[in-house]
Image (cartoon, rainbow, N blue to C red):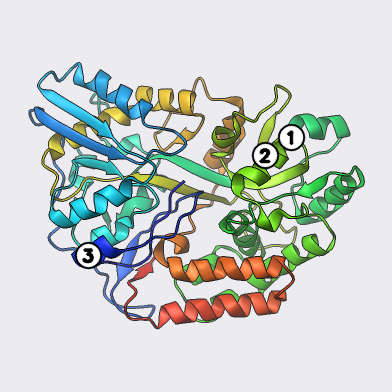
Amino acid sequence: MEMKSPFSFSLLSLALLVVASSCGPAGTTTASEPESGTGGEVKVAPDAPAAPTGEGELKGTLEVQAFKGGYGLDFYEDAAKKFSESHPDLIIKVEGNPRVWEQLKPRLVAGDPPDLMYPGWGMDHWALVADGQLMTLDAALDSPAAGGNGTWRDTFEPALLKLGQQNGRTYVLPYFFNVNGWWYDKSVFDANGWAPPQNYTELLSLCEKIKAKGIAPITYQGKYPYYMMFGMVLPWARSAGGAEVIDRMQRLEPGAWKDPAVLKAAEMIVELRDKGYFETGATAMTHTESQADFVVGKAAMIPCGTWLFSEMKDNLKSTNQLTFFLPPVLGEGKGDPGSVIVSIEPWMIPAKAKNPDAAVAYYKYMTAVGVAKRFVATKGTLTAIKGSDEGSLLPVLQEPSRIFKASGDVWSWQVRDWYKEMHTEVENALTSLLNKELTPEQFVDRCEAAAEKTRYDASIVKHTL
């Protein structure tokens, strides 16, 4: 899906930044600190202009640049056509491609950005905030929503809206979002009398039954280890030790990665590995390869976000009943068993946008509940708009939507956005653990070393929760 580099860049470094390619969920961040330690004054761009309310006269040209990923651009183009019917003096241009950030970076450097953008995983939007490149959106959020029913802020799920804030100011807004967890095929489970495991003990018992049938109990996207980070390491560490364990990791606190809860998560992965419960060769598989194996029944379960259906819809058989469930928790754990990891796909208005009033008005239209419902129905994903999951929600999304609404512990893993080099090292350590090159103790030691290196690197902007 989307990923961003962790480094704050000046206008020069913005043009030179190279970001490693990947796919999958995108988390967001909250606040950044200029100092290398875990404290310090929060850094906020003091000259960031405030976006207008979108209630001015709409005319001229509105340029929208968007990442062309699995959901395409057609919905945004169609929304632009419908919106322009009520604004005949406004010309809307919606453009984009799978690497749109490459065109946007030099334009931001030159002071010639589009009016509204969804730049995709190759753009570090928090670095743009640090450079004063994005407008603040709070005044706009406190203005009337499309249709005049309450404020625009009231349109969004609060837990998702706050992921676009830094030091109390909002710089990016969510549209569709991802719920991360595990999947199984209900038709296969029903045929065998299996039930999705609710805890780790049940998981071990089920895996043995599945293995006896000649099916791999679990597969995973080995070439992109963050899937297992989101699906196993992080939820199991949170389950074992509670939310504070993850918070300490995200704050780069000394020793956080060596917490017994993180070690426990690594030990659980090793146990599954040594019992032969992972699909053979999964470490070398891409996301599409492992997911395709899951869909055709070569593996019974897979960790993945709610984009799974959209990515695999062309591979699905009529008998498939893809069903979401939360990672099996530890029965003796301290964490909330209903804990849910989410991530958003952010949109933003550049500080030098030429038509910010139109940008706000168009995005207000995009986030109107009726329009958001159409996105949910046509694209097979969830949006951050309240009520957008009511009505024609695809069966595959009903369970993740229910779980999200019911959870008392909705959170986001933001280290992958904040400290990309560090997270790459953590992912590499996880691959080494799966390949039997590291013990669980060596895994947490290597992760702690990566965190320590980041903690004391004064060139890296630090972030707070």
Which residue sits at x=46%, y=64%? Answer: 415
Which disc, if any, is residue 296? Answer: 1
Which of pointers 1 and 3 indicates the residue nearer the eye? Answer: 1
In this figure, which residue is indicated by the disc labeled 2? Answer: 292
Which of pointers 2 and 3 indicates the residue nearer the eye? Answer: 2
The secondary structure type at the circle numbered 1 is loop
Which residue sits at x=50%, y=81%? Answer: 254
Residues at marks 1 and 2, CA–CA distance in whole angstroms: 6 Å
Which residue sits at x=29%, y=67%? Answer: 8
Residues at marks 2 and 3, CA–CA distance in whole angstroms: 44 Å
Residue 52: image quadrant is: top left
Height in image: 328 above or below 450? above
Asked if residue 460 can be seen in this view, the reply is yes
- The 10 Å Cα crowd at callout 1, few under 14, some 14 to 19, many 20 or more, is some
Height in image: 292 above or below 268? above
Which residue sits at x=56%, y=25%? Answer: 394
At label 2, the amino acid type is: Ala
Height in image: 80 above or below 183? above
Residue 309: image quadrant is: top right
What percent of the width, then of the height, locates residue 169?
Answer: 25, 55
Contact flag, marks 1 and 2 (Cβ < 8 Å): yes
